[in-house]
């Protein structure tokens, strides 16, 4: 079993903007991963470059950095922040959203 599991969920923002929700799951009992666990890590199939991606889940900052880089080819990338009840857009290639904006959403089940 991989120490890092990624699940892609089709979802939409509170405003109806479709995006891919990329959920991080660290299945080990302690939830600890090491940098070498990035080797061979692949994004799930089905990420659409025409839509944004929101990354959500517990993980170290370097995992988020890696995933933002890997999702670069999508329309935009946001990182979910539960305190804001939305995702902060950290990268964009579209006029739909801007860097630093908060995309309001509820977490998919």
Image (cartoon, grey):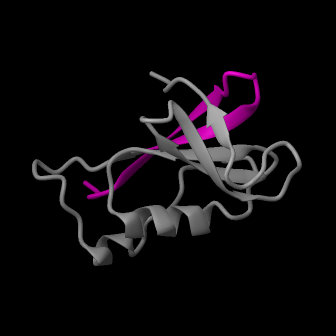
- Residue 33, relative to residue 48: is it above or below? below
Residue 106 inside the magenta-drawn segment: no
Residue 18 inside the magenta-drawn segment: yes
Depth check, front residue: 19 or 47: 19
Depth check, front residue: 63 or 1: 63
The percent coordinates of residue 45 (x first, y second) are 60, 49
Q: Residue visible at 66% across and 36% down?
A: 103
Q: Is residue 102 visible?
A: yes
The percent coordinates of residue 3 (x first, y second) are 26, 58
Q: Is residue 37 left or right of residue 82?
A: left
**Magenta span:** 1-23
Q: Is residue 38 left or right of residue 51?
A: left
Q: Residue visible at 49% across and 68% down?
A: 65
In which quadrant will I find the C terminus? top left
Q: Is residue 55 left or right of residue 16?
A: left
In which quadrant will I find the N terminus? bottom left
- Residue 77, relative to residue 70: is it above or below? above
Q: Is residue 46 visible?
A: no
């Amino acid at each position: 079993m991989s120490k890092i599991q990624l699940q892609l969920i089709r979802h939409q923002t509170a405003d109806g903007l479709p995006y891919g929700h990329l959920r991080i799951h660290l299945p080990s009992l302690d939830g600890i991963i090491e940098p070498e666990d990035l080797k061979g890590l692949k994004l799930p199939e089905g990420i659409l470059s025409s839509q944004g991606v929101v990354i959500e889940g517990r993980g170290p900052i370097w995992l988020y950095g890696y995933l933002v880089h890997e999702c670069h080819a999508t329309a935009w990338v946001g990182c979910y922040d539960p305190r804001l009840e939305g995702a902060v857009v950290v990268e964009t290639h579209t006029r739909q959203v801007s860097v630093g904006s908060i995309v309001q959403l509820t977490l998919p089940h």
